[in-house]
Image (cartoon, grey):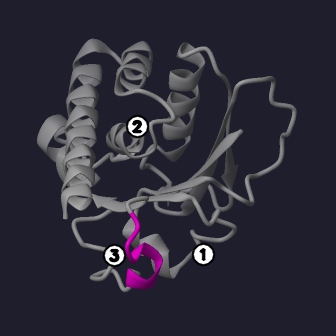
Amino acid sequence: MFQVRIHGRGGQGVVTAAELLAQAAFDEGAHAQAFPSFGSERTGAPVVAFCRIADKEIRVREPIMAPDAVIVQDETLLRAVDVFAGLSSTGYVLINSTRTFDELGLGQYAAASTRFITVPATQLAMEHLGRPVPNAVLLGAFAALTKVVSLNSVTDAIRERFSAKLADGNCAAATAAYEFVAHQLEGSVSA
């Protein structure tokens, strides 16, 4: 079972991201489960959502305490929430930021790892959608980083969920993020 924990703030589409990821996995024939955990239910408050992906039925229904991947939709949470809590030693970390892990003060986490990456998801969302909503963008990046789901499944899930115009922008942004991560990974392999 592959477990993903998504951290963000209310209004950033954290819950939608988990649901889209589950739908992408389901479309590929996997079993999937997505659910949120709320504290204060207001725009801007920290929100966490979870997604499990497995090749057999998922019976567990509790929050994910030992994720295989962590997606952080808002870098300001890095100082407010322990987003790395329980992360597997072979886990993946994807952070929405224009800064590197060193610039974020997290160099110790990413040292010599191709599983830790930052992506300018809000910037890509603004470019392709005209709105600062990084959720679908980060799913494109997640597909490139982990290979747990394909970009095609992510864009299919987006198209199933949103109207044509909104889907087109989200798919373009997710594709741009996928290409960004693929390029970063190629660079780290050849370095």
Q: In which quarter of the image is the N terminus?
A: top right
Q: Which of the two labelled residues, at mark 2 and mark 1, occupies the earlier sequence position? A: 1
Q: Which of marks 2 and 1 is in front?
A: 2
* Residue depicted at x 19% and y 48%: 183
Q: Is residue 108 magenta?
A: yes
User: Given the current orientation, which residue lies at the most extreme right position?
Assistant: 59
In the rendered view, does 91 fall on the left or right side of 130? Answer: right
Q: In which quarter of the image is the C terminus?
A: bottom left
Amino acid at circle 2: Ala
Q: Which of the two labelled residues, at mark 3 and mark 1, occupies the earlier sequence position? A: 1
Question: Secondary structure under badge 1?
Answer: loop
Q: Where is residue 30 in the image (x, y as percent from the top left)?
A: 64, 21
Tell which of 112 and 6 is nearer to you.
112
Question: Secondary structure under badge 3?
Answer: loop
Q: How crowded is mark 2: few (under 14 residues within 10 Å), some or many (20 or more)?
A: many
The residue carrying mark 3 is 101
Q: Is residue 66 above or below residue 16?
A: below
Question: Secondary structure under badge 2?
Answer: helix
Region rendered in magenta: 107-113
Q: Which of marks 3 and 1 is in front?
A: 3
Q: Where is residue 61 in the image (x, y as percent from the top left)?
A: 84, 40
Amino acid at circle 3: Phe
Amino acid at circle 1: Asp
The residue carrying mark 2 is 143
Query: Could you say which quadrant of the image residue 137 lies in?
Result: top left
Q: Which of the two labelled residues, at mark 2 and mark 3, occupies the earlier sequence position? A: 3
